[in-house]
Image (tube, rainbow, N blue to C red):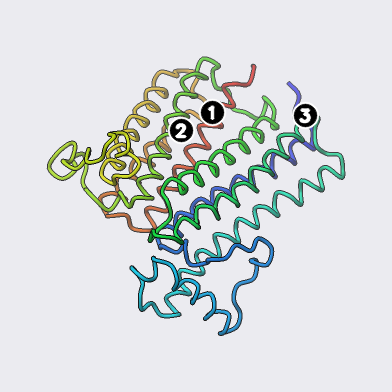
Amino acid sequence: MKTPPPQSRAIAIWLFVIAAMILAMVVIGGITRLTESGLSIMEWRPLSGFLPPFSAAEWERVFALYKTIPEYQQLNRGMSLGEFKTIFWWEYVHRLWGRLIGLAFALPLAWFLLRRRVPRGLAPHLFAMLALGAAQGALGWFMVTSGFGQRTDVSQYRLVAHLALALAIYGYVLWIAFGLLGRRALPPVGAALRRPLLLVLCLLGATVILGGFTAGLDGGMVYNSFPLMGDRFAPADLWIMSPLWLNFFENPPAAQFAHRWLAVATVIAILALWIGAGRNRGLPIHLLALFALLQASLGLATLLLVVPIPLAALHQAGAVLLLGTAVWALRAASEPR
């Protein structure tokens, strides 16, 4: 087996840094939502938006814009400028971090291309990542604008689309980065585990998507008990919408019900994979099982304690880390030995 060439290792390290920044971005975005800060900036200025307000007059101007939307008029009427600044800074950091990810990707990409350090066949993937990053920024603004009309929050559909694209980019970046390391740098995982790992990855993705709907509907604020929801396995208000499938996307108790039990099924599937893997486990499989148990514990604590922000942020970070571990395991199992 040959070790990967230096340029491939350098690009892999760079992509791992980008993936870590995306993980942090998802957590920052989650805190922005939990603190109800996402609608505090009503302008999209991709270039000049690097700079926050500096003068008292500029602060009054952006605060006056916020006062025109339903969130302020119906939920935060009477908010002081100091209170507004608190939610403003969370949204500002969220957008600033997104811009920094763009720079951290585009500038090294230009350097690698100019120095001809990009291995053959890799350039299309890197340009695709760049395009997806730009689309993510536009999708984020599309999400925010959904809260400027009649709603007091953003559309849960657009929120989930924004989250799903972020995770898709994250998984794509990791897949390419692990591939650049070569077979010697990937822990041995049996090829027979490829299909079970693909199933686990699909279950994880679906669980996170339903978690996004639960978060977007504030579904974690209802039925804060487990395993029952109140005094019943399935609450009485589970099927209050027609058609029935709509409940999972617009009815908070149903969204939480689907999320919690799909999460349980996912953890069981991961543990079954770990048990059945035998000698083919490898480090990624061990970590996948460990992180699944930790993530389940974080989710349960977040629910029972009625979604405290620190625990909810850790739960969101755990979901991203678990997805990344599944991608690592699948990539290792897909490499010919």
| Nearest-to-viewer mark from 2 and 3 | 3
Sequence-wise, the earlier of marks 2 and 3 is: 3
Note whether 242 is above or below 62 in the view shown: above
Sequence-wise, the earlier of marks 1 and 3 is: 3
Q: Tag 2: residue type?
A: Leu
Q: What residue is shown at x 27% (from left), y 34% (from top)?
A: 244
Q: Quadrant of residue 233?
A: top left
Name the residue beneath numbered marker 2.
Answer: 288
Front-most of 92 and 326? 92
Name the residue beneath numbered marker 3.
Answer: 121
Q: Are marks 2 and 3 in contact (CB under 8 Å)?
A: no
> Crowdedness of circle 3 by 10 Å Cα count: few (<14), some, many (20+)?
few
Quadrant where the C terminus sits is top right
Q: Are marks 2 and 1 in contact (CB under 8 Å)?
A: yes
Position of residue 29 in the picture relative to residue 225 (left or right) = right
Q: Tag 1: residue type?
A: Ala
Residue 314 image point, x, y percent: 42, 51
Q: CA distance from mark 2 to mark 1?
A: 8 Å
Residue 137 image point, x, y percent: 60, 52
Question: In this orientation, does residue 209 appear?
Answer: yes
Name the residue beneath numbered marker 1.
Answer: 329
Front-most of 103 and 297? 103
Q: Tag 3: residue type?
A: Gly
Q: CA distance from mark 1 to mark 3?
A: 23 Å
Residue 1 image point, x, y percent: 73, 21
Question: In this orientation, does residue 21 appear?
Answer: no
Q: Residue 184, labelled with which disc?
A: none
Q: What residue is shown at x 58% (from left), y 60% (from top)?
A: 95
Note whether 40 is above or below 271 in the view shown: below
Residue 308 image point, x, y percent: 33, 58
| Nearest-to-viewer mark from 1 and 3 | 3
